[in-house]
Image (cartoon, rainbow, N blue to C red):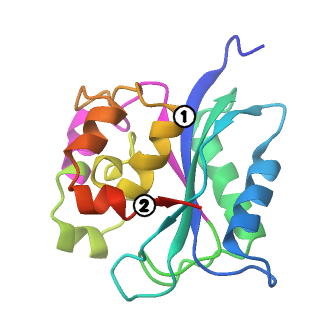
């Protein structure tokens, strides 16, 4: 059934209601929208409540991770994720700002895009620069996924043994390396 398909992992989150519905409902509806013949949902993590980042910047988030089998190339898959965000009126007003839906392409097979040097440049970018800088190209794996409990904790549900193609560590080991207070702040709903 999944022959000739690539495996992508996406992160989903939000912290604003959409048309009066809570964020968990938005995430469920977004997952249903993503399920297409060219994008088969293989598994979805539990939903997690996660603190707003930066602290005090708004309501807490609901986050999840999904594994997809897809025939779409990574750039087209990202466009599809952005179209689903737009359907839920995602507005990109402020970097890391509040939103009804965020859908991030975290991984695509074991691809490193656009190349190792650029991926590493974005992965190693200091935190203050991350707030101001936005890449103008697709960076895979997502350059900050290894730093984010709200990504790694849900990934433990669906892909604990996935190995980061640059860091050569599993999701489990990356998550274990995070501060305990960060991991503990990500709570199943």
Above or below — where is 150 with respect to 38? Answer: below
Front tag of 2 and 1: 2
Q: Count neighbours of disc 2 (C-alpha within 10 A) and say few if under 14, some if 14 to 19, many if 20 or more.
A: many
Q: Is residue 18 left or right of residue 60?
A: right
Using the image as rendered, state which of residue 175 and residue 131 is in the foreground: 175
Residue placed under numbered mark 1 in the picture:
158
Q: Locate the N terminus and report the quarter of the image it occupies.
A: top right
Q: Is residue 118 magenta?
A: yes
Res 10 → quadrant: top right
SS category of the residue bearing label 2: loop
Res 164 → quadrant: top left
Using the image as rendered, state which of residue 10 and residue 21 is in the foreground: 21
Residue shown at the point (33%, 82%) measured from the top left: 55
Q: Is residue 167 left or right of residue 143?
A: left
Q: Locate the C terminus and report the quarter of the image it occupies.
A: bottom right
Q: Is residue 39 left or right of residue 102?
A: right
Residue 83 in view (yes/no):
yes
SS category of the residue bearing label 1: helix
* Residue 183, horizontal then vertical, whole percent: 33, 55
Question: In the rendered structure, which disc, 2 or 1, sits on the residue that comes first in sequence?
Answer: 1
Q: CA distance from mark 2 to mark 1?
A: 16 Å
Q: Is residue 77 left or right of residue 97?
A: right
Q: Is residue 27 magenta?
A: no
Q: Are marks 2 and 1 in contact (CB under 8 Å)?
A: no
What segment is highlighted magenta in the picture? 102-122
* Residue 60, horizontal then vertical, whole percent: 50, 77
* Residue 140, horizontal then vertical, whole percent: 40, 40
Residue placed under numbered mark 2 in the picture:
186
Residue shown at the point (36%, 66%) measured from the top left: 134
* Residue 137, horizontal then vertical, whole percent: 42, 51
Q: Count neighbours of disc 1 (C-alpha within 10 A) and say few if under 14, some if 14 to 19, many if 20 or more.
A: some
Residue shown at the point (25%, 34%) measured from the top left: 116
């Amino acid at each position: 059934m999944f022959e000739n398909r690539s495996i992508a992992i996406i992160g989903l989150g939000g912290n604003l209601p959409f048309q009066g519905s809570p964020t968990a409902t938005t995430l469920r509806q977004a997952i249903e929208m993503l399920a297409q013949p060219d994008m088969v949902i293989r598994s979805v993590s539990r939903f997690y409540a996660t603190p707003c980042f930066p602290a005090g910047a708004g309501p807490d988030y609901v986050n999840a991770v999904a594994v997809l089998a897809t025939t779409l190339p990574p750039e087209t898959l990202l466009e599809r994720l952005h179209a689903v965000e737009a359907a839920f009126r995602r507005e990109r007003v402020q970097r890391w700002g509040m939103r009804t839906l965020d859908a991030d392409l975290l991984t695509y097979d074991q691809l490193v895009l656009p190349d190792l040097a650029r991926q590493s440049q974005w992965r190693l970018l200091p935190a203050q620069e991350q707030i101001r800088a936005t890449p103008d190209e697709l960076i895979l794996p997502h350059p900050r996924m290894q730093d984010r409990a709200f990504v790694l904790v849900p990934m433990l549900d669906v892909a604990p043994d996935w190995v980061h193609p640059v860091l050569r560590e599993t999701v489990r080991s990356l998550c274990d390396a995070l501060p305990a207070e960060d991991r503990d702040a990500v709570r199943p709903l």
